[in-house]
Image (spheres, rainbow, N blue to C red):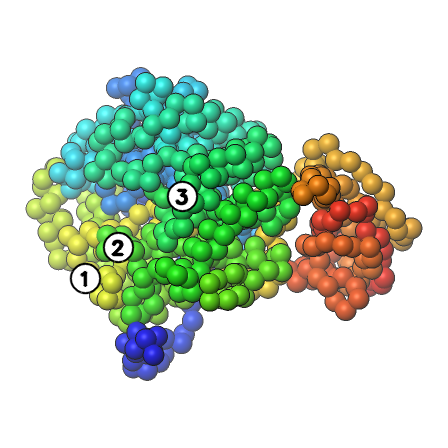
Amino acid sequence: MEKLIRMFPLLLVLLLCPNFAFAGHDYGQALSKSLLFFEAQRSGYLPHNQRVTWRAHSGLQDGKASGVDLVGGYYDAGDNVKFGLPMAFTVTMMSWSIIEYGKQMAASGELGHAMEAVKWGTDYFIKAHPQANVLYGEVGDGNTDHYCWQRPEDMTTDRHAYKVDPSNPGSDLAGETAAAMAAASIVFRRSNPAYAGELLRHAYQLFDFADKYRGKYDSSITVAQKYYRSISGYNDELLWAAAWLYQASNNQYYLDYLGRNGDSMGGTGWSMTEFGWDVKYAGVQTLVAKFLMQGKSGHHAPVFERYQQKAETFMCSCLGKSNRNVQKTPGGLIFRQRWNNMQFVTSASFLATVYSDYLASSGRNLRCSSGNVPPAELLSLAKSQVDYLLGDNPRATSYMVGYGSNFPQRVHHRGSSIVSIKVNPSFVSCRGGYATWFSSKRSDPNLLTGALVGGPDAYDDFADERDNYEQTEPATYNNAPLIGILARLGGGHGGYNQLLPVVVPAPKPAVTKPQPTPSPKTTPSPASWSGPISIEQKRTTSWVANGKTYYRYSTVVTNKSNKSLNSLNLSISKLYGPIWGVTKSGDSYTFPSWLSSLSAGKSLEFVYIHSASPADVSVANYVLA
C-alpha cells in the first residue's frame, strides 16, 4: 500500500502528460550532451577541437608561483577552483564507464570524446605529481573564489597551489589519484600503450606514497575542509586504489592487499547506502565481488565473499529489499541529501548497472534479505533513475541542461551565467559579477549543455534559481558515472559479459595486434579439427582454494577462411565449471548474443574455470557466407 501511495503523484503526472511520459528517451543524445559538459569545465589552454566555443583559455599561470606547471585539469562545479579529490574520482568513474561500456560508446561514436575527457584529467595529474611522494591537490581557494562571481577567463582570485608530501600526507587524495591513473591506464592500453604505461607508473608511486605516509589530505590542505572534507578517512581510498591497480596490472600484490586488509580497513565491515567522491566502500566491494566471480580470489575467497556480501547489501538497499534501505522521493528518485543529491543517484545507479551485468555474466541472482532477486531488477532500477533525471518525474523536468524541452535555465555556474568573453571581452570584476550576472533573473547566456544539476529535494520539488546552489549547481562527478549508464542503456539489453578480460577499443578504426597473455601455459586442444576454423586453448592461471586446484582456461576460435562465419555451433564436453563468452543452445554452444558473425581472420575468445584438464572443444557445425 505504501508503494501505491508514494507513486500516486507520479502516476497523476503520467496520466495528465501522456505524450511526455511515454515518449522514451534518447540515451545516445544524452550521452553526447553529458560528454560536452566536461569540455565546458576545462581549465588551461583549450584545444583547436574544443566544441564548447563560448569558453576560452583560463588559469594559465596555475602553479607558476610554486615552480610547477599546473595548467589544465577541470573545474569541479560552478566555481573556478581545481579540487584534486573530486577531480580524481571523476576521472576514475569516467574510466570505469569506458572500461565496462567502451564498445557501446564506440558504436554511438562517442568513445573518442570520452577518452579525450579522461586524458584531459590524467594529463593534469601527471603534472600534479612531479615527484614520487609529492602530489598537488588543489589550485585556488574556495573562500576567495566564492567571494567572486567571474568567468574563469577573468579570474582575479588567489591561485595558490596546495600539495601533500611525507610531512603533510594525504592518503585519500593520493589513493584516489592512484585509482584514477590505474583505471585510465586500462582505457589507453590498446590505443596508446606508452601513455598507459606512464599512467601506471604514476599509479604505483602514488599508491606507495598513500600507503606509506598515512593521513587525511584535508588535515594537510586545510582550505579543502569546507568544501571537500574527507569524512570517511583514507582506508576506503587505499582499498579502492589497490583494486584498480590489481585490475590494471594483474599484480598479485594488490589482490593480497585487498585480502589482508579487507577486515581491518572496513572493506568487509561497512554496509553502505551511498557511494561518491568521499565514500568508496561500495565501489571497492563491487570490484572485489567481480574478482571473486571471475575466480581470481584464490585463498582470499572467504574475505572476498564478505566484501561481496556488503556489495549485495548496498544493491539490495537501493532496491528497497534490505534491512536498511535508501530513501526515495515520492516520484522514486534515490535521495541522500538536499545539496547536490544527483551525485549519489548516478553513482549508485552505475554500481547497480555493472553489478547487474556481473551477476548475469556469472549466471547468479542477487541475494537480498527478502529473497533472491534477478539481475535485471538492478538494471531496471538504474534505468528508472536515469529516466527520472531526464524528465520522467512529477515536475516533468529534465535535470540535464539542454536535454528535453524543460530543463534548468538559471544554473549556478559562473561561466554559463556570464556572457562569453568572445561575445563581450569587457572585464567582469569580482563583485561586479554578482551585481550584474548572478542576480539576473534571465536565463543563462551560455547553454551549459549536458550538465547534470543537483536536482530536486526529498519531495520532488525544484526551484530553478541561480542562488539555489544546492539544487542548480552541476558537478563533474555527477556526470562521470552517468556516461557509463547511458552507454549501457543506449546499447541494448542483451549479451553483456562483464567478467571477460577488458579490451577497450580504439576510438577510431585501427588494426591492432591482440596483447598476449603474460607467460601462458599452452595446452593443445583435444579436438582434432583441421577445417577453416581453428581452436586453441590455453591455461592462463591457476590457484588453490580449500585444498583444491582450479584452472582458468582461455579458448580462442579463429575464422581462418576468407568468408564470414555466420553460424557456429561448438561441442564442449568434460566441462565442470562456469563458462563465459558463448551462449548455450541445446546441447551445443554458439556465438554470444552480442556477436552475430565472425569476419574472415577474426577470433572469438571464451573462458571457463574448473579443477580438471581442458574441456573437449570441437566444431559441431558452421555456415560460411
N-term mark: 3 or 2:
3
Q: Tag 2, which secondary structure?
A: loop
Q: Which residue is tagged 2? A: 337
**Residue 280: assigned label:** 3
User: Are the residues flagged by discs 3 and 2 in contact, CB closer than 8 Å?
Assistant: no
Instruction: Estimate the x, y position of residue 219 in percent, counting from the top left.
Output: 26, 28
**Residue 128: assigned label:** none
Q: Residue at x 84, y 49 (%)?
A: 534
Instruction: Estimate the x, y position of residue 134 in percent, counting from the top left.
Output: 38, 21
Q: Quadrant of the N terminus?
A: bottom left
- Of residue 510 and residue 616, the one placed in the foreground of this image is 616
Q: Which three-letter amino acid code belongs to the residue tagged 1?
A: Ala
- Of residue 82 and residue 226, the one placed in the foreground of this image is 226
Judge left or right: residue 451 versus residue 319.
left
Label 2 neighbourhood size at 10 Å, few (<14), some (14-19), many (20+)? some
Calculate the distance from the C-alpha at mark 1 to the C-alpha at mark 3: 30 Å
Q: Which three-letter amino acid code belongs to the residue tagged 3?
A: Lys
Calculate the distance from the C-alpha at mark 1 to the C-alpha at mark 2: 16 Å
Q: Quadrant of the C terminus?
A: bottom right
N-term mark: 1 or 3:
3
Q: Residue 236 lies in what quarter of the image?
A: top left
Q: Which three-letter amino acid code belongs to the residue tagged 2?
A: Gln
Residue 382 in sight here: no
Q: Tag 3, which secondary structure?
A: loop
Labels 1, 2: front one: 2
